[in-house]
């Protein structure tokens, strides 16, 4: 098939690359000229394991093409994927301006039957809005091409995006048209060979499924974070509790790790968008509001522990921060807990040496320039370089190389062996026996 994917970010680029890997001809479109130029040179703008090879191979084979002009790509596409961002607006609602802009452009250029697929995460009712916008444009042109709008939310995880796309748990297709459903079934058959993973439902049902999945995962995290604080006060080890409850098959082990809060481009904005959807309908989304509030609180927790231990004024002190990305496996720092922590530390006068295996470039781009110019924040080349002469180390992202560090080297390098572990990576007893002053999340020891 001939496909067009509009938006070449984490979702769009992975979608386009994976479909081209299956033999389809794919045009990837983005308004960001430098991104498109770099992609044409084989430079992948994001860090995503396995993506580079697929993009480069399919580009060389001519199945994957990049352009800034949607009109170029519209010559003979059967399916248009909308995969642009839907960031949080000022009131917490999803900002649909990019989605609507793309829908308008599709309407301005459509010249034969096509399926328009909403892959971006969009509020319930957006499929209908996209349909209206395309119809308006067709009417303005005085033409009458049939088309269908389908919702096909994406469930990939950054850091494992290619794998998730190639081997999805389920493929949700929200469609009101048999013709469009058939097109989507054909397109996704290659990803559903092991057993039928395709679930067809209404467009609104599909839109809601995506938000509900993210909100459920965020709820599990916030719930465990709340329990972990209580555990800390009660002198209970939350890790024991986690194992104890996970063994119940109704609960399960996944997504019940306490930590220093969730971040990323999805959970925070999607929980907020769902809150907004409820409030617009005069409902009181008490659980969702608590999930969000708990997360804001949780992101401040490491900073709070540090100020309890060292005092409110941190001038003259230096801290190592291990991990800046919002989770391991990605260079994405959107809404990352590390950002809240850096503001707390630097805001209180501290200096920070930070190390992340892949997010350094993102950090240089996204964090305040003044921090770098005034050397309040220094990014190091190696995880151990960040430890030189520091008063404490704070682990924020659980990258694998942080799991089994050389503890002797750590003690030698640090001014004092104090560790704040935001991801419960180490064994408290072992850390204490090695002479570390060790603070984790909900493992019994209070600051
Ligand atoms: P992103 O910010 O990485 O990429 C969006 C891209 O769209 C950018 O490159 C931007 O330049 C481009 N764009 C914006 N307006 C455009 C236009 N008019 N024409 C062409 N390109 C345009 O976003 P993302 O993380 O890939 O997320 C995209 C959508 O998918 C969001 O709705 C998000 O909630 C959802 N989603 C994201 C993930 C994830 O892990 N990142 C997972 C599932 C779903």
Image (cartoon, grey):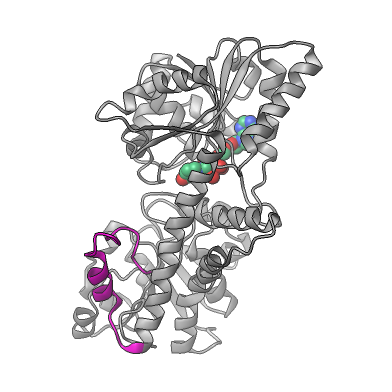
Task: Give the residue drawn at x 64%, y 38%.
Answer: 126
* Of the pair 426 and 188, the residue shown nearer to us: 188
Quadrant of residue 96 within the rendered picture: top right
Q: Position of residue 112 (x, y in %)?
A: 62, 10
Q: Does residue 376 appear in the picture of this structure?
A: no
Q: Position of residue 89 (x, y in %)?
A: 68, 52
Quadrant of residue 346 within the rendered picture: bottom right
Count the marks: how many? 0
Q: Position of residue 342 (x, y in %)?
A: 52, 69
Q: Is residue 341 above or below residue 328?
A: below
* Of the pair 242 and 329, the residue shown nearer to us: 242
Q: Is residue 135 above or below residue 45?
A: above
Q: Is residue 227 above or below residue 360?
A: below
Describe residue 80's horizontal placement relative to residue 431 as left or right: right
Quadrant of residue 375 within the rendered picture: bottom right
In the image, residue 242 lies in the stretch drawn in magenta: yes
Q: Quadrant of the C terminus?
A: bottom left
Task: Give the residue drawn at x 21%, y 75%.
Answer: 408
Task: Give the residue drawn at x 31%, y 88%.
Answer: 235
Q: Position of residue 359 (x, y in %)?
A: 44, 52
Describe residue 249's horizontal placement relative to residue 8 as left or right: left
The boundaries of the magenta stretch are 234-258
Task: Give the residue drawn at x 45%, y 13%.
Answer: 1
In the image, residue 196 lies in the stretch drawn in magenta: no
Q: Is residue 106 above or below residue 316?
A: above
Type of secondary structure dominating the magenta stretch: loop
Q: Does residue 155 appear in the picture of this structure?
A: yes
Q: Dividing the image into four quarters, tell me where ligand 1 lies.
A: top right
């Amino acid at each position: 098939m001939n496909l067009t994917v509009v938006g070449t970010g984490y979702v769009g680029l992975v979608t386009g690359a994976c479909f081209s890997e299956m033999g389809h001809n794919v045009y990837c479109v983005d308004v960001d000229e430098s991104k498109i130029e770099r992609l044409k040179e084989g430079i992948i703008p994001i860090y995503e394991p396995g993506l580079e090879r697929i993009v480069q191979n399919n580009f060389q084979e001519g199945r994957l093409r990049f352009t800034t002009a949607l009109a170029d790509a519209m010559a003979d596409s059967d399916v248009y994927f909308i995969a642009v961002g839907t960031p949080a607006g000022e009131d917490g609602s999803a900002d649909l301006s990019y989605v609507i802009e793309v829908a308008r452009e599709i309407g301005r250029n459509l010249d034969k039957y096509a399926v328009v697929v909403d892959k971006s995460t969009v509020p319930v009712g957006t499929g209908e809005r996209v349909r209206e916008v395309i119809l308006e444009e067709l009417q303005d042109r005085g033409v009458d091409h049939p088309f269908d709008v389908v919702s096909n939310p994406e469930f990939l995880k950054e850091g494992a995006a290619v794998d998730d796309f190639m081997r999805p748990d389920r493929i949700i297709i929200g469609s009101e048209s048999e013709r469009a459903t058939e097109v989507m079934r054909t397109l996704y058959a290659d990803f559903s060979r092991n057993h039928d993973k395709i679930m067809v439902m209404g467009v609104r049902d599909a839109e809601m499924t995506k938000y509900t999945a993210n909100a459920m995962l965020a709820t599990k995290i916030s719930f465990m974070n709340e329990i972990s604080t209580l555990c800390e006060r009660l002198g209970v080890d939350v890790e024991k509790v986690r194992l104890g409850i996970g063994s119940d098959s109704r609960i399960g082990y996944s997504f019940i790790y306490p930590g220093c809060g969730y971040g990323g481009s999805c959970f925070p904005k999607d929980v907020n968008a769902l809150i907004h959807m409820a409030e617009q309908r005069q409902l009181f989304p008490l659980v969702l509001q608590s999930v969000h509030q708990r997360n804001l609180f949780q992101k401040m927790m490491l900073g709070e522990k540090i100020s309890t231990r060292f005092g409110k004024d941190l001038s003259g002190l230096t801290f190592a921060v291990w991990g800046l990305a919002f989770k391991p496996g990605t260079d994405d720092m959107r809404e990352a807990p590390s950002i809240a922590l850096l503001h707390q530390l630097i805001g209180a006068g501290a200096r920070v040496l930070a190390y992340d295996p892949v997010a350094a470039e993102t950090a240089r781009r996204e964090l305040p320039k003044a921090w770098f110019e005034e050397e309040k924040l220094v990014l190091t080349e190696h995880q151990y370089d960040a430890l030189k002469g520091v008063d404490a180390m704070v682990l924020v992202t659980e990258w694998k190389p942080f799991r089994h560090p050389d503890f002797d080297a750590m003690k030698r390098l640090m001014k004092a062996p104090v560790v704040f572990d935001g991801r419960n990576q180490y064994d408290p007893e072992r850390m204490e026996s090695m002479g570390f002053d060790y603070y984790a999340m909900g493992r019994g020891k209070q600051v």
